[in-house]
Image (tube, rainbow, N blue to C red):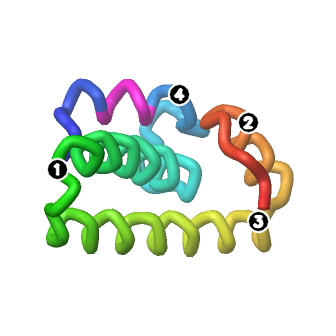
Amino acid sequence: MLAKTKKQKVIKTVQTHEKDTGSPEVQIAILTKRIEELADHLKKHKKDNHSRRGLLQLVANRQSHMKYLAKKDPKRYAAVLKKLEMKKK
């Protein structure tokens, strides 16, 4: 789980306006950060299958958001990928 301060930092990097907390860009960024933290956890605790299932759900959820954004507005999608330093599929 992300701490409040970490979450706010992630939101500030991709938000489209001052009070933006729910746009697809912000949701993708938050999910990405949670995935990174959970992946680090699973490197230490290889047999934690409950967390592994949660990680797979987060990845699927992020993929859904990314597919939506790519279909809705490809420019915003490319900008999010660039900001989050992710590869295009």
Q: Amino acid at mark 4?
A: Thr
| Residue at position x 67%, y 43% in the image | 86
Q: Residue furthest right?
A: 75
Q: Amino acid at mark 2?
A: Lys
In the rendered image, which quarter contains the C terminus? bottom right
Categorize mark 3 by other alpha carbons within 10 Å: few (<14), some (14-19), many (20+).
some
Q: Where does label 2 land, which residue?
A: 82
| Residue at position x 48%, y 31% in the image | 18
Decide which of 51, 81 is in the foreground and name it. 51
> 65 above or below 18?
below
Q: Where does label 1 land, which residue?
A: 45
Of the numbered discs 3 and 1, the one sitting upstream in the chain is: 1
Q: CA distance from mark 4 to mark 3?
A: 19 Å
Q: Where does label 4 land, which residue?
A: 13
Of the numbered discs 4 and 2, the one sitting upstream in the chain is: 4
Q: CA distance from mark 4 to mark 2?
A: 11 Å
Q: Amino acid at mark 3?
A: Ala
- Label at residue 70: 3
Which callout, 1 or 2, points to the residue nearer the camera? 1
Of the numbered discs 1 and 2, the one sitting upstream in the chain is: 1
Categorize mark 2 by other alpha carbons within 10 Å: few (<14), some (14-19), many (20+).
few
Q: Amino acid at mark 1?
A: His
Dividing the picture into quadrants, the one containing residue 66 is bottom right
Q: CA distance from mark 1 to mark 4?
A: 30 Å
| Residue at position x 56%, y 35% in the image | 14
Circles 3 and 2, Cβ within 8 Å, touching? The answer is no
Q: CA distance from mark 3 to mark 2?
A: 13 Å
